[in-house]
Amino acid sequence: MNAVVYLRISQDRSGEQAGVERQREACLARCAERGWEVLTVESDNDLSASGKRRRPGFENMLTAIQAGKARHVVAWSLDRLQRNRRDELRLYEACKESGASLSLVNGADIDFSTAAGRFVADSLGSVARFEIELKSDRQRAAQLQSARAGKRSGGRRPFGYEADGVTIREDEAKAIRRGYADVLAGESLGEVARRWNAAGLLPPQGRRDGTQGGVWRRDSVRVVLLNPRNIAKRAYRGEIVADAVWPPIVDAPTFEAVKATLTDPTRHTGRTSAKQLLSGLALCGVCGATVHAGGSTRRGVRNYRCSASTGHVARMADPVEDYISRVIVARLSMPDARDLMTSRDHPDIDSLRAEADGIRTRLTQLVAAFTDGALTDEQLRVGTERLRKRSAEIDAELADAGRADVLGPLVAADDVQAVWDSLTDARRRAVIETLMTVTIHPPGRGTRTFRPETVTIDWKTA
Ligand SMILES: [Zn+2]
């Protein structure tokens, strides 16, 4: 019959310090009395831990019970054995499962292989479970209350803010604003990450001390940009529940536009740097499928091929790209280029935002009315459905307003060609996509020179 002895050194404010040696001697004596062989003596030291650290000794003890190696657990007292209710429950369940017994030097023996022992374990276990649930209910209620008051949640320092979560950290906030602008201009998240890293802005980690660690990656940049904290909204479990107590870093239309861009299911999430300018963008003149980079030929010439069928279109990339670039620079250099942006109905952003706020309030009221029994399931469903639909429309309109950023830098430039040349491919793609649909036709037999009529440009804005 093997026993595992478990010792714990703990802060003892009551003065009844049971030294670890005294615990050990008493537990070993108990094993000798009962004729149990001591399999192992496990111990943990809680003195330095604030209740957060794992207890390797406790885990080893559980493993020994679960593996059926230890039939008995010997400890000084119940409070020496477990540190929290969760561990207590795990211990009871492990003992019940394997029929191990618990022997306390200062306390009872609990034999989990008997009906009485299981009853005691179940009773103690359900008390433990109740306390755990009560605690998490209280925590959840407190978290929700704090969220509704617009206060920050604990945890790590948010990027863009100081450790208090309220004061803006200007260099990071500037990088975040630039990140939103870059995404709207068609830049990839990977490029934003690269720029933040290059600027020496590292992600905050750990708790409120805001110490730095790791580097930015596509996914972590995405999390920052999609966080409604940046428009001073407090979210709780993914829903915005209140205006936050901290100031915003960007305005709502910018945020909504970026959100629409990043959550667009058709967005290409792969590395855009490996792409050719018109891959996935221009269409095959034969079937309408997109074209992609056809790989280099023997002479190392880049080309475009129909992505649906190898027989449709295969064109050298350089002349087509040169042509599209020349057309865009020419168009954006025209005196009326500004109209490309302003000819669109510019939505009244302030009134849209006000309407969106009103919808959120109305949704909260509907849920409250439902909770009070004033609404049926069906009334709630119909009511929220209509509001959510309108809310989605508003988000889309706000997103449209943000897309003007794609053309802005070019239209405002004195030297459009120079700005175009300075853009990354990702941003050029965004410009092309905003302005036109490009269709590439077969070049025709035996033709060596580029003929513009073999590339169709359909302008999206008249
Ligand atoms: Zn095709």
Image (tube, rainbow, N blue to C red):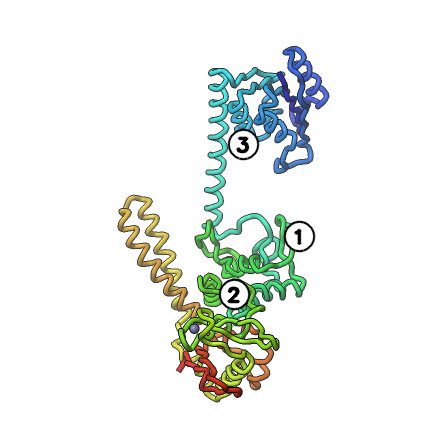
Amino acid of disc 2: Val
Q: Nearer the viewer, mark 2 or mark 3?
A: 3
| 369 lies above or below 170 | above
Q: Name the one closer to the observer, 368 or 430.
A: 430
Earlier sequence position, callout 1 versus callout 3: 3
**Disc assigned to residue 86:** 3
Check the image and name the residue furthest to the right. 21
Does any atom of ligand 1 lie closer than 8 Å to the CB of label 1? no
Q: 10 Å neighbourhood of mark 1: few (<14), some, or many (≥20)?
A: some
x%, y% of residue 286? 41, 76
x%, y% of residue 157? 60, 53
- Give the structural element (helix, strand or loop) at label 1: loop
Instruction: Compute the Cα span from label 1 to label 3.
Output: 31 Å
Earlier sequence position, callout 2 versus callout 3: 3
Q: Is residue 229 left or right of residue 20?
A: left
Mark 1 highlights which residue? 211
The C terminus appears in which quarter of the rendering? bottom left
Instruction: Compute the Cα span from label 2 to label 1.
Output: 24 Å
- Give the structural element (helix, strand or loop) at label 3: helix
x%, y% of residue 133? 47, 34
Amino acid of disc 1: Thr
The N terminus appears in which quarter of the rendering? top right
Say if residue 252 shows up in the picture: no
Mark 2 highlights which residue? 250
Do the CB atoms of the residues marked 2 and 1 lie less than 8 Å apart?
no
- Give the structural element (helix, strand or loop) at label 2: loop
Say if residue 354 shows up in the picture: yes
Q: Nearer the viewer, mark 1 or mark 3?
A: 3
Q: Quadrant of ligand 1?
A: bottom left
Amino acid of disc 3: Arg
Residue drawn at point x = 28 percent, y = 47 percent: 377
| 130 lies above or below 395 | above
